[in-house]
Amino acid sequence: MGQPIRPGYAEKAFVVFVLLIALGAFQNLQVTGPIATQNMGMVGMQILWSILYLITWVLYSRSCGNPFRALFVVSPLIVVVAFAFVSAIWSQDPWLTARRSIALALTLVFGVYLGTRFNLREQFRLLAGAFAICIMFSFLFELLGMNPPDPEVPGWYGIFEIKNHLGQNMALSAIVFLIWKQVEPRHKALAIAGFLASVILLALSIAMTAIVVFALLMLLLPYLQWMLRKSRRTVALATSFSVAALVESGLYSFTHLQEVTSFLGKDPALTGRLPLWIVSVSMALERPWLGYGFDAFWLPNQTYTARIWRLMSWMPPQAHNGILELWLNLGILGTGIFLVVFAYYFAKALQYWRRNPGPGSAWPTIFLAFLFLMNLTTAFFLANNNFYFMLYVAIAVAISTKRSSISPADRIVDAGADRV
């Protein structure tokens, strides 16, 4: 069998388009109707995603001799998705859970396609292209007043619906450009420009969670680089020290909540998140083991949803904590499966970094750390049609196969490859 045809401009443009839609770019331009219908989906977007996934499957099948077999390179994640699908049996809305589980499975397929069709360097080019579009249009929208912010919530929104989306996307964008500079030094000037522009937009968003997570990762990166060069014993001791420091920091923050939140410019209730977490735990304890069904808790037609919204004096569409959201949707059993799989891939990412000290090898570990930290105050661990779940799957592919490491041979072969 001959070698698969290398991705062309059209295929790369398609992938960048899907990444932009998955990021939520330009969705601030949509008219979604009354807020009471939130979380029920939009027919237009459902049709668009159906078309995109059909094209994805055609491209994936064409480039992979046995696409179904190739999917099992991420079999631990397939177990997670399968559990979400099975939750339709006890879901409050079985049809909705089944439909969204199918979308989650197709999101996984796109992630596998991204991870198998493109090596890490090509993935960085695609990500850099998508984030560059987000950066340029975010500045344009703000300067032209095309996305005016809520007067009560200061900060830039860019091309996203809320400032937190701009903040978290620009935090990851800055990390992507920072690592891309190492992966392809010939694009150093572009990478530095992208990094600086991302940091500026991150600051202008005033999204404190994203700012804090980005600062933590910038401090964590050199520490991890030092740690992974040491012996296994030193790594174990350093890891134990890091966990102890993290626990101590958490305890200090909890016991000095007002001082910490005041320093970050927040109220002690964390902009309504703390009472929301309390209510979410109370509701999760009503169905602790299996939850309410995948993506079937925050539904406007449920009596308890209206009561929670009245109690909160706002309409949260999620628990604003990834683990709590998993608990509500999939119960303790599903949450445990997800966290075990996540820990498995995080350990593999560290191992990958240790065994491949070249450029880009830090990316899987840094992304997974970013994903975990961001989910402390928002929830997108397990979400269909979601950029971050796609990237999680693609990274799982990268650290599970030998092909994805960036070696000198790759640089020679790719020297004349098409650029995004």
Image (tube, grey):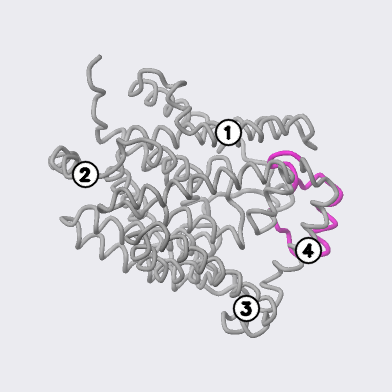
How far across and how far down the image is residue 258, in percent?
68, 83
Mark 2 to mark 3 CA distance (whole Å): 45 Å
Q: Are marks 2 and 3 in contact (CB under 8 Å)?
A: no
Mark 2: amino acid? Ser
How would you rate the neighbour count of disc 1 (Cα within 10 Å): few for under 14, some for 14-19, many for 20 or more?
many
User: Which of the 4 image quadrants contains residue 367?
Assistant: bottom left
Name the N-terminal-most of marks 3 and 1.
Answer: 1
Which residue is labeled 4 in the image?
A: 278
Which residue is labeled 3 in the image?
A: 266
Which residue is labeled 1 in the image?
A: 103
How far across and how far down the image is residue 106, in percent?
52, 31
The residue depicted at 46 percent of the width and 70 percent of the height is 216
Q: Nearer the viewer, mark 3 or mark 4?
A: 4
Question: Up-down: is 265 above or below 75?
Answer: below
Name the N-terminal-most of marks 4 and 2.
Answer: 4
- State the extent of the magenta-drawn residues as a range: 292-317
Mark 1: amino acid? Ala
Which residue is labeled 2 in the image?
A: 407
Identify the secondary structure beneath mark 1: helix
User: Which of the 4 image quadrants contains residue 268?
Assistant: bottom right
Q: Nearer the viewer, mark 4 or mark 2?
A: 2
